Image (cartoon, grey):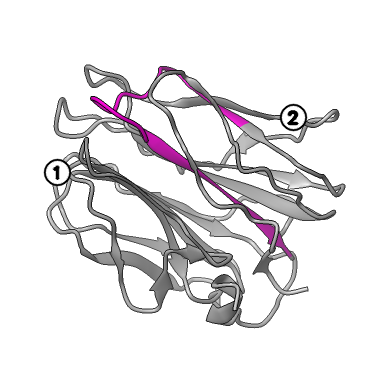
Amino acid sequence: MALAIDSSTPAPDNVTRSTAAITTTNTFSPPAGSVIFLFISGTGPSPAATQTVTGVSDNLGVHLGWALFTGSRDNVQSGILLGGNTEVWWAACPSAQSNMTVTVTFNSANSSSSSNPAGMIQPIVFTGAATTQNGNASIRNSTASATPSQTLVTSAANSWVFGIVQNFTNGTGPTAGASQTNTIDGTSSIVLNASDGDAFWVQTTNSTTSSSGTTVTLNDTAPTTIAHHFSMVEVLAASTGGMIPLQWIAGG
């Protein structure tokens, strides 16, 4: 089975500013043998201090083994220039589940100045994925403003590269670079807070990468010159597979 996004993947959930523990309201029902990734971002506490996801749990009787994707946490701070975090968690799901929710706990409540959302949680359910996810990761790890662009070198054939970005400067969403999309299972993975000037999004290449050792770039042509966090991860396939058509991503 080729690596693919399962149709059970829900729309993203907003992170509220009032509490550190956020439970998703968009329930989803992953199939047996799937692997779930959570792309997470928050604006961080105020005044600016290091923001971290301290744990992920779910509403299942026998809970999944959630883990931080190694190397995916970007929470470097720079005073009022850049706060918050982006990071990725994952878990294998051996048995089919119904009406699943997840709870993401931050070390401190997030802090949009006057309104929600103060971040995003985007679950993505994969089929044909390896049950142990130890692919490569790449983070921006910078406090200077720039146009979002990040690279990752793949460690395996037929893996798929995804990223999450937090725009800390303004509430402008992305214009994804060539051969990339912000649409996951037919739903936009962009969350905007125009009032407080924050934006959050997940993006991915339009297809898997056929060869290991390939340098993959995720980038946006707009917005430009923003303070941002950017976490990229490589989702490993269970076995070699073909390219995934764009219409599968967009639910067409």
What is the distance, in whole Å, between disc 2 and disc 1 at their CAs? 39 Å
Could you say where residue 179 lies in the image, as x and y percent from the top left? 40, 78
Q: Who comes first in sequence, dot 2 or dot 1?
A: 2
- Amino acid tagged 1: Ala
Magenta span includes 115: yes
Residue under the image location 45 percent in, 18 percent down: 19
In the picture, which quadrant includes the C terminus?
Answer: bottom right
Label 2 crowd (10 A; few <14 / some 14-19 / many >=20): few
Residue under the image location 71 percent in, 50 percent down: 132
Q: Can residue 40 be seen at all in this image of the molecule?
A: no
Q: Which mark is residue 72?
A: none
Magenta stretch: give its range.
103-127
In the picture, which quadrant includes the N terminus?
Answer: bottom right
Report the side of 247 relative to 17 (left or right). right
Residue under the image location 43 percent in, 26 percent down: 52
Magenta span includes 239: no
Could you say where residue 43 lies in the image, as x and y percent from the top left? 32, 32
- Amino acid tagged 2: Asn
Residue 119 higher or lower than 179, as above or below = above
Q: Which of 104 and 239 is in front in this view?
A: 104
Could you say where residue 170 lies in the image, as x and y percent from the top left? 18, 45
Give the structural element (helix, strand or loop) at label 2: loop
Q: Can residue 183 be seen at all in this image of the molecule?
A: yes
Residue under the image location 74 percent in, 29 percent down: 59
Circle 2 residue: 59
Q: Which mark is residue 144?
A: 1
Q: Which of 247 and 40 is in front in this view?
A: 247
Label 1 crowd (10 A; few <14 / some 14-19 / many >=20): few
